Image (cartoon, rainbow, N blue to C red):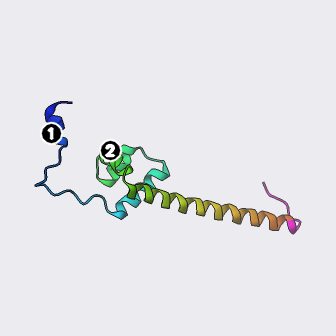
Amino acid sequence: MSRDAMQEMVVDPRRPLSPGPSPARLMLAAQLCLDDELTDEEIARRLGISRRALVRWKHLPEFQAAYQRQAARLQAALDAALAAQAAALAARVVAGGHDPS
């Protein structure tokens, strides 16, 4: 790495640090990543950031927490849907009905 490139990485103490992504943007980024339908490049474009910024976000504890919250919500919704289907099937069996599938 060149000396100029290394100096660009040094934080200028006179320049204020950016506040970072908002919790709402992190939650949206986490949801888009969890959906697994878009590439990181497409997710970054939707968020108005670079792919490199998205990669940095993914390492933030706040992003990881948001991702885990979204994953837990998705798992709970899937569990509830599966339980509802199982209950409906069990009710048909008990009633003597037939499974249409």
> In the image, what residue occupies the spot 54% across and 63% down?
73
Where is mark 1, residue-wise? 7
Looking at the picture, tell me which residue is in the foreground, 38 or 67.
Answer: 67
Q: Which label was assigned to residue 63? A: none
Q: Residue furthest top?
A: 1
Region rendered in magenta: 94-101
Looking at the picture, tell me which residue is in the foreground, 81 or 69.
Answer: 69
> In the image, what residue occupies the spot 43% across and 55% down?
64
Q: Position of residue 40 (x, y in %)?
A: 39, 45
> In the image, what residue occupies the spot 52% across and 57% down?
71
Under mark 2, the amino acid is: Arg
Q: Is the magenta region chiefly helix, strand or loop?
A: loop
Quadrant in which the C terminus is drawn: bottom right
Q: Secondary structure at mark 1?
A: helix
Q: How many marks?
A: 2
Quadrant in which the N terminus is drawn: top left
1 left or right, relative to 29 = left
Q: Secondary structure at mark 2?
A: helix
Q: Is residue 50 above or below residue 97?
A: above
99 left or right, relative to 31 = right
Under mark 1, the amino acid is: Gln
Q: Which label was assigned to residue 51? A: 2
Q: Residue furthest right?
A: 96
Q: CA distance from mark 2 to mark 1?
A: 22 Å
Category of crowding for the residue at label 1, using alpha-carbon neighbours closer than 10 angstroms: few (below 14), some (14–19), many (at least 20): few
11 left or right, relative to 72 = left
Category of crowding for the residue at label 2, using alpha-carbon neighbours closer than 10 angstroms: few (below 14), some (14–19), many (at least 20): some
> In the image, what residue occupies the spot 19% across and 42% down?
9
Between marks 2 and 1 in the image, the one whose residue lies nearer the viewer:
1
